[in-house]
Amino acid sequence: MPLELNTPPSIEPVTLAEAKAHLKVDTTDDDALITALIAAARARAEWHTGRALITQGWTLWLDAWPEVIAIPLPPLQAVASVTTYGRDDAAHVLDGASYFVDAASGRIALNEGHAPPTDLRRLNAVAVAFTAGYGDAEADVPALLKEAILELIAFLYENRGEAPAELPLDCLALLAPSSSEIIMLRTLNQRAALLARVLTPDGGGGFSESWDAFATVWIALFPLGADDKVGADHLESRVRHRIALRRRGDLAAGQRVQLGARLFRVHGVLDGGAKQSYTTLLCEELS
């Protein structure tokens, strides 16, 4: 999965003034060194987390068309183009209406009615040009990642001129939450519909019930095991699952998740807040 950098970030997520304040450096003697260390620290932070911080443009090269294209370096801002190359090396830019881009999970899939491209060359047959990063400004980068970069700069500044050393644990701890989020978000590999209950007056003083889809999302399904529930006259099996999806604000207990022919009732929503990019639903599969 080769990656080609087309447009590097125009600025760094930490300014020279912020770095010098963190280092408690008052002179300008080391400005050039500290500026270089800022770029090095940002590159290390991006490598450890697998994320792009400031807006940057990349091309992802693939040897074949997969069922779902997973775009690295989240957060994904936009996909500029998807180009395929035939055996004769002729380039073909796909119509944007032929595929679906889920920016939240960083995935691309062909829309219904569109077949995967064929007769492609053996290597670097698909090129996905995309823009990644939290934004164009330093303030767009999460504070936790900026703090990690400042700690990295301090580490590199204190150890300049010496043999490479392992990063300090406190710095790695600041980077760890972003890394674990990527692992979770990259498991979102199934398309499902979120359903909400709708009651419509039936004209006779009552209501008719229906379940309407209000969103289509990528999810990961994790079985939690089975337990027995005693009903009035019989024993029925009750299977619980955990469903992870990209964080959103319109989730609630009582909703349903439809995954193909399978249907799940949402019993609870576990949301870690704005610092976490995904939400967990506690569900029961309906018979």
Image (cartoon, rainbow, N blue to C red):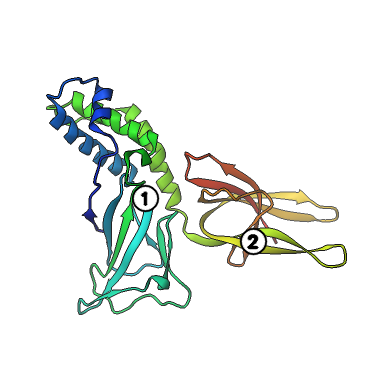
Query: In the image, residue 247 lies at what x, y percent?
Result: 52, 48
Near-viewer residue (232 or 33): 33
Identify the amino acid type marked 1. Pro
Q: Secondary structure at mark 2?
A: strand
Q: Secondary structure at mark 1?
A: loop
- Residue placed under numbered mark 1 in the picture: 74
Near-viewer residue (135 or 103): 135
Is 41 placed left or right of 284 in the picture?
left
Q: Identify the image quadrant of residue 54.
A: top left
Is disc 2 surrounded by few (<14), some (14 to 19) or many (20+) residues within 10 Å? Answer: some
Task: Judge depth for marks 1 and 2 and give the one in front.
Answer: 1
Identify the amino acid type marked 2. Leu
Q: Is residue 152 above or below residue 185?
A: above
- Residue placed under numbered mark 2 in the picture: 263
Q: Identify the image quadrant of residue 27.
A: top left
Q: Earlier in the sequence, mark 1 or mark 2?
A: 1
Q: Identify the image quadrant of residue 49.
A: top left
Query: In the image, residue 39 lies at what x, y percent?
Result: 21, 38
Q: Residue at x 38, y 75 (%)?
A: 116
Is 27 placed left or right of 270 in the picture?
left
Is 25 placed left or right of 50 in the picture?
left
